[in-house]
Image: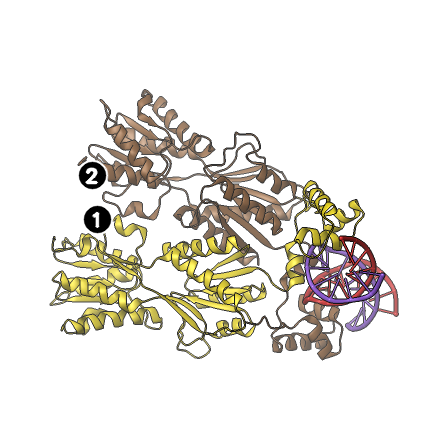
Chain colours: A brown, B yellow, C purple, D red
Amino acid sequence: MKPKKRTTIYDIASKLNVTPSSVSRALNNTGYVNETTKKLILKTAEELNYKRNILASNLRKGESKTIGVVVPRINQNFFANVIAGIEEVTYKKGYNLIICQSNEEYDKEVQSVNTLVNQHVDCVIISISVETNSDETNNCRHLQNVLDHGIQLIQFDRVADELETLKVINDNEQASYEAISHMIDQGYKRIALLEGPQNLAIFRQRKNGYLLALEKHGMPVIDELVIENAWTKELGAEGTRKLLGLAEPPDAIFASTSDFSALGVLEVAMATGIQVPQQLGICGYSNEDFTELTYPSITTIDQYSVNMGKTVANLYFQERENADTVAVSKTISIKPKLIIRSSTQRLKE
Amino acid sequence: MKPKKRTTIYDIASKLNVTPSSVSRALNNTGYVNETTKKLILKTAEELNYKRNILASNLRKGESKTIGVVVPRINQNFFANVIAGIEEVTYKKGYNLIICQSNEEYDKEVQSVNTLVNQHVDCVIISISVETNSDETNNCRHLQNVLDHGIQLIQFDRVADELETLKVINDNEQASYEAISHMIDQGYKRIALLEGPQNLAIFRQRKNGYLLALEKHGMPVIDELVIENAWTKELGAEGTRKLLGLAEPPDAIFASTSDFSALGVLEVAMATGIQVPQQLGICGYSNEDFTELTYPSITTIDQYSVNMGKTVANLYFQERENADTVAVSKTISIKPKLIIRSSTQRLKE
DNA sequence: TTGTATGCGTTATCAC
DNA sequence: GTGATAACGCATACAA
C-alpha cells in the first residue's frame, strides 16, 4: 500500500491561480475572501478530494485535539461504558480519543501516561490501577508529570485523592450505606464485607459506608467478618469459603469491590448448597450486565457509567471554556443507585 | 490551564551550543554524533523534561502512527475484546488507536470513517454496522474512499465481501454447522433458526451452516422455523413467542445472531415455564461472558475475540513490512469453537 | 479582498 | 562529526 500523495491547499491554490492563504481562509471560513472564488475553492477542494492535514493544522495551532484515556481494562463493562460516554461527547466536538489500558499494572499505567504526554494530548482522563498506591511517595509522579506539562488531568472513579485535579466520582460511602441498610431491613444480622485494596480511596469509602451503616443501626462490627483484598472473582470465592468456615458464619456478604467478586460468592454458595437469599444474602457493586442474568439475580449498585463518561468529557470542555477563572481542583460526585434484585430479597413484600 | 511552552530541540541546542540537527540525531540515534556530546544531549533532554513533539515528527515523516478503529458498539463484549487485542499489539509498536462507534447506524459509520481519513490515520480497521448494506450501490463508498486515499483498510468479523481488502473473519458456516450437528446429536428434531439481517455476510454464512447441517443429516428445512431479523434480545424474544405459538413448535432454537438473542429466547422459555434443555434446546453465538452465568448456562460459539484483535493488528504490520510485494486482498479465517453448556445438553453422558 | 512572509517542531539532505 | 537549510502542510499577522 503506497501512501499516495494527498492534495494540499497548494494544489488547490495553484490550480485556481490564487494563494494558499486564500484557500486556507476559504476552507476555514475565516477572514475575508471573495464569495465567488470561495465557492470555486470549495468546489475544487471537493473535486480533488481534499482533506485537511490535521497534523499540520494542529501543529500550527499548538493543540492536538486529542484526549487520552487510561483505564485498568477496556473490556470491563464499567470502563467500556464510561469510554462510550466520553466518546459520544468528544466525537461531536471533533476530538479524538487515544485509549490505553493499564491492565491493573502500575508500570503499564506509567508507560501509558507517558505515551500520552509524548503525544501531546490536550487532556488525560484516568482511572488509576489497583497497583497505583497513592500513599507511597512519588507513586503518582507520572500524574503530576501530566500537570507539569500543562496538560489537563481528569480523574474518575478510582482517583488519587491527594492530587489536586478535576475529579468525577461516585458517592461510594453513601451507596454502601444504603446497600447495608437495605440488607439490615431484610433481616440479615451478620453481614460480612469483602473489601478492596485500601490504598484506593473508593474501597476505603465503601468500607466506611459499611461501618457507618452498622453503627447507625446499632450493630457491632465483627472483625472476622471483614475480608481484606477480595476484589476479583477468585479472591471473592476464596474469602467466601473462609467466611462460611467460621464458627458463626455470616448470613449476608457485601462484595464491595465489584460484581465479579459477588459472582465468586454466589458460585461458592451454589456449590455448597447454600440457599440465596434465604440463608445468605449477596450484594455486589457496579451493575455489570450479568448481575441480572445470574440465578438468583444479584443486588448491586449502578454507577451510571455512560453518564459518568459524558460528565467527564463535558467537564473538560467546560473548564476549557473559562480557562482563566479556573479552579485547579474540582470534584463532581454522582450519586449511584442501589439496584435491589433477588439475591437480597428475603422478605417478599 | 495554560498550555505551557514545552521544551524543544532548539532549547536543548542553544543551551549546549550545538545545532538542533545534532540534537535530533542524538535523540534519534541516527547519523553520526560525538559520543560525549550525545551523552550530554541526552542528559539535558532529561533535565529539561523534553518530549518529542509527535505532531511535528509525524508531519515531517508523512505518517501519523495512528490507527482508526470503527465498531458498532464499544461496550459490547466481543468488540471490547477485539479492541483490547488490537491495543495490545499496536501499543507495543508505538501506535495509537482512535476508537469510533457507529452505534449500528450507517450515517454515523460514514461520518466516523471520514473523520479517520481526515485524521490521516495510517490504517482503518472496521466491522461494519448492520445498516451497511453491502449490496446496495455506493453504500460502501466510504470504505472505497479510504482505499482511494492510500490508507490501509482491514475489515474484521462483519465484512463487506465484495470489497477487496484485508479481512479477518470467523469461519461462520463451519461453526454453525457444528452447532446444529451437536443439537441433532442431542436428539433435537425440529431446530429453529433465528437469523440476522441477510445483508451481512456473517449472517448469511451462519444460515448456510444451518441449512447444510440439516441437509447432511437428512433433515428437512421447515420454512416456518426460520425467523428473519431476530438479532437483538427483544427481537429474539419476539421470534421465540412466534415459534412457540406454532401448531408444531420447535424443540430447539439456534440464535445464530448473538448471545443477546439467545438470552431473549431463554427469558421467554423461563417465563412460559418451558424446560431448558429438556423441552427446548438453545444455542447462541459469541460466547459473551454472561452465557456461562445464566441458568441454565447457554451453549454458544467462541470467536476468540482478543486473539482476533491481535491477528488484525499483526496483519497490518506484516503487510506494512513487505509493502511492495503485497496482495491487495487477503483473508484470514479463524476457526471458532463450539462451547457446549447446559442449554443443549439433553443427554447426560 | 488578496498576497507575502513567517513559524509550528522535526527530520533529512546536503555541504563543510 | 557537525551545521546550515529546506521541507512537511497549514494558519495567521501584516502589508498591499
Tell me if I can see residue A163 in this picture: yes
> Label 2's element?
helix
Categorize mark 1 by other alpha carbons within 10 Å: few (<14), some (14-19), many (20+).
some
Q: CA distance from mark 1 to mark 2?
A: 14 Å
| 1 or 2: mark nearer the eye | 2
Chain of the residue on which disc 2 is drawn: A
Q: Which residue lies at the image location 72% right of the left edge and 48% below the top edge?
A: B35
**Callout 1, which amino acid?**
Tyr
Horizontally, residue B275 falls left or right of residue B33, namely left
Which numbered disc covers residue B295?
1
Q: In the picture, which quadrant includes the N terminus of chain B? A: top right
SS class, disc 1: loop
At horizontal 23% and vertical 23% (from top left) the residue drawn is: A248
Q: Position of residue A46 (x, y in %)?
A: 61, 75
The three-letter code of the residue at mark 2 reads Ala
Q: Which x, y percent locates residue A270?
A: 21, 39
- Does residue A272 sit above or below A190 in this rendering? below
Q: Which residue is mark 2?
A: A271
Residue B158, percent from left and from top: 38, 67
Q: Are marks 1 and 2 in contact (CB under 8 Å)?
A: no
Which chain does the residue under circle 1 lie in? B
- Which of the 4 image quarters holds residue B4? top right
Residue B311 position within the rendered picture, expressed as x and y whole percent measured from the top left = 42, 61
Q: How many marks?
A: 2
Position of residue B301 in the picture relative to residue A336 (left or right):
left
Q: Which of the 4 image quadrants contains residue A297?
A: top left
Horizontal side of B87 relative to B119 (left or right) equals: left
Name the residue nearer the viewer: B57 or B44: B44
Q: Nearer the viewer, residue B190 or A239?
A: A239
Q: Residues within 10 Å of mark 2 (few under 14, many from 20)?
A: few
